[in-house]
Image (cartoon, rainbow, N blue to C red):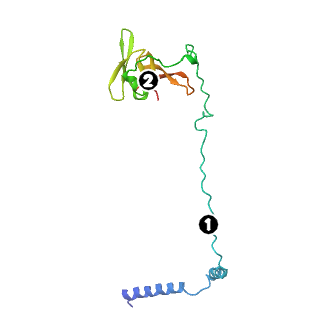
């Protein structure tokens, strides 16, 4: 007896359809799930609770930002021996201001130094890019900054600044050669 291939494939298809229909038969294996859904559906419907009211954000202003960090040691400033009494410090009265005194000290840069007969002269570049030669005793910046010492890579000066109470005080400043500052 010979079985034709089309008949065999039709028989396999028919068997698969029967197996699928048997799987979908009405059996009681999901009766507990249906019972749970029926029980939940029978409970009275509760209204949805409204969202809680949110309090507006209250910002906090940190007031100790300008104070010294508690993790750093207090800064001890050694008093200079040659410091004049506080009342005797004042800007020079008869001083004629030079061009470099019209500029803020932050805009001036030390770009080099010259040594002539054992004495150093600084080369200062202003905010416009012009280079000026300065020596010890010259003034720089808007706060009567008098040059005290010039070295190969740095220039030290002392400014006369207001102490906020009607008096004056000396403030040492250093301008370092461009590219040699540590940081």
Q: Is residue 110 above or below residue 52?
A: above
Q: Residue at x 38, y 9 (%)?
A: 118
Q: Nearer the viewer, residue 49 or 92?
A: 92
Instruction: Measure the alpha-carbon separation of dots 2 and 1.
Output: 63 Å
Q: Is residue 34 above or below residue 78?
A: below
Q: Residue at x 54, y 22 (%)?
A: 168
Name the foreground residue: 53 vs 83: 83
Under circle 2, the secondary element is strand
Label placed on residue 99: none
Up/down of 143 relative to 57, above or below? above
Callout 1 crowding tier (Cα within 10 Å): few <14, some 14–19, many ≥20 = few
Residue lying farthest to the bottom in this orientation: 1
Pinpoint residue 71: horizontal percent, then vertical percent: 62, 33
Q: Position of residue 158 (x, y in %)?
A: 48, 20
Q: Residue at x 61, y 40 (%)?
A: 63
Mark linked to residue 175: 2
Q: How many marks?
A: 2
* Element type where label 1 sits in the image: loop
Q: Quadrant of residue 129?
A: top left
Left or right: 6 with respect to 174? left
Mark 2 neighbour density, 10 Å: few (under 14) some (14–19) many (20 or more): some
Closer to the camera, 171 or 11? 171
Closest to the observer, 89 or 156 = 89
In this rendering, position of residue 84 left or right of residue 3: right
Percent across and percent down for residue 47 are 64, 75
Quarter-of-image position of residue 124: top left
Give the percent coordinates (x, y) of residue 165.
57, 26
Quadrant showing the N terminus? bottom left
- Report which residue position mark 1 lands on: 51
Residue at the image position 40 percent from the left and 23 percent from the top: 101
């Amino acid at each position: 007896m010979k079985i034709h291939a089309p008949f065999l494939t039709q028989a396999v298809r028919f068997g698969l359809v029967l197996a699928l229909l048997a799987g979908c038969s009405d059996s009681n294996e999901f009766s507990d799930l249906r019972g749970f859904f029926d029980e939940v559906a029978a409970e009275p419907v509760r209204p949805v609770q409204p969202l809680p009211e949110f309090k507006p954000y209250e910002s906090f202003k940190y007031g100790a930002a300008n104070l010294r960090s508690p993790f750093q040691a207090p800064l001890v400033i050694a008093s200079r021996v040659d410091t004049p009494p506080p009342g005797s410090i004042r800007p020079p009265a008869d001083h004629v201001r030079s061009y470099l005194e019209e500029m803020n000290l932050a805009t001036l840069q030390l770009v080099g130094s010259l040594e002539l007969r054992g004495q150093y002269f600084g080369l200062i570049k202003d905010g416009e890019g012009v280079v000026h030669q300065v020596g010890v005793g010259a003034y720089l910046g808007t706060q009567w900054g008098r040059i005290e010492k010039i070295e190969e890579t740095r220039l030290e000066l002392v400014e006369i600044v207001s102490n906020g109470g009607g008096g004056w005080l000396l403030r040492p400043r250093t301008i370092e050669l461009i590219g040699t500052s540590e940081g």
